[in-house]
Amino acid sequence: MYDVIVIGARCAGSPTAMLFAQQGYRVLLLEKARFPQDTLSSHYIHQPGVALLNQWGLLDKLIDAGCRPINHQSYEAPGVRLDGFSLPVDGQRTTYAPRRYVLDPILADGAVAAGVEFRQSCAVTDLLFEGDRVVGVRYTTPGGAEATDRARLVVGADGMRSLVARKVGAPNVIEHPRQTCTYYSYWSGVPSHFELYARPGRWIGVIPTNDDLTLLMAYFPQDEFSQTRKDVEPAYLDAFRTTAPELYERMQAGERVEQLYGTGHQENFFRKAYGPGWALVGDAVNHKDSITARGITEAFLQAQTLTEHIGQDLHDDAALEEALEAYEEDLDENHTSFYQAALNVAELKPEGRTEMLQKLVGHQDLIDRYFSTLSGACSIDDFYNTELLTLLDQS
């Protein structure tokens, strides 16, 4: 009998397991893959996520793994270019965008170091119920045998297509249609910082990652997915040529070193976050278009929030119910704005923001504060301060 079983050992699951174990609970962490294994990702960790890695004692391990530091961000759209960087969070301003076969094992190792029992190549196939309460899991072992384990709380950190969410019937409480599709690959010989380029109908993301490689992402409207996927490479390269010509020239001097990866299945939803004996974190509870690269950071924040709310109250029925309700309220209060921001950007209509952003040019403090709203270092309310409102009111 475990206190907590966490299903999924990537960006949401391993930190959740680690933090529960640090609170003294007996934790089982199950992962269907065997690390290291890559996965679709935009890689970027915003300042709040970096601050948590540092708090958890894992940031130095990420740096030692050869992840390139990022200290400069630019955004370019027709008629405007901004250069700057987000304000720090807990003293952490430098950011990173690690490959997932680098990051995920670091997180899992952190969980094991905290006392978590970690089992890889274990595919969860079902949940165990007593009445309407989840009391455990059924899974296959690496050798193909069937096993069961029981726990006070089962946490689904098993992604957008969460088995836990499906088995408990967790409904979508917020839902929007898919808006973009994306294709990306890794390039050598393309000097870069964190670069974003936009024009109507296109969005380009440029992110330095491990091994002196650069992640180059192209976003297209969802209604172009069926056509784009038929002939991906020409569409991908044309997106760079027409959206970021200077970057396209840099790419000509570089080399694509991996295949093109992509997806058109970028769902947008919030699910019910908890129920009797279960809770959801990460993409299992809130998935949105990857265009703002918020997934890893929010997975970290949700792991921290869930475990902090529960604290030492896991075995007190009334207190646990109250803690899970508070966790769900926290998701609504602190993550909905980033969800809506992703939807806004994923419309691929930068012209709606151009006039406001043009007025920031020449005001470095406001530019950095704008980038801070995207990272989470500054709230929208704090961004729209007296200085900005005065500037916007000027003709």
Image (cartoon, rainbow, N blue to C red):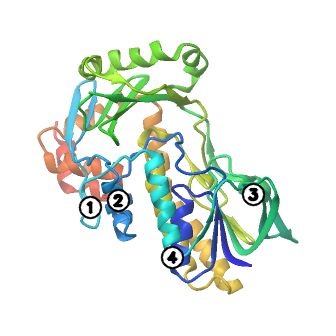
Task: Indicate the position of residue 192 as horizontal and vertical percent values.
Answer: 25, 34
Q: Which residue is mark 1?
A: 92
- Mark 3 = which residue? 141
Which amino acid type is shown beneath numbered disc 2? Val
Front tag of 3 and 2: 3
Q: Residue 308 got which mark?
A: 4
Q: Nearer the viewer, mark 4 or mark 3?
A: 3
Residue closer to the observer: 188 or 374: 188
Residue in the foreground of this view, choosing between 126 and 29: 29
Quarter of the image containing the N terminus? bottom right
Q: Is residue 267 left or right of residue 387?
A: right
Earlier residue among tags 4 and 2: 2
Q: What number is the disc on residue 125?
A: none
- Whole-number angstrom distance, CA of label 2 to CA of label 1: 7 Å
Quadrant holding the C terminus: top left
x, y percent for residue 338: 45, 51
Q: Amino acid at mark 1?
A: Gln
Whichever of callouts 2 and 1 sits on the residue coming sooner in the sequence is: 2
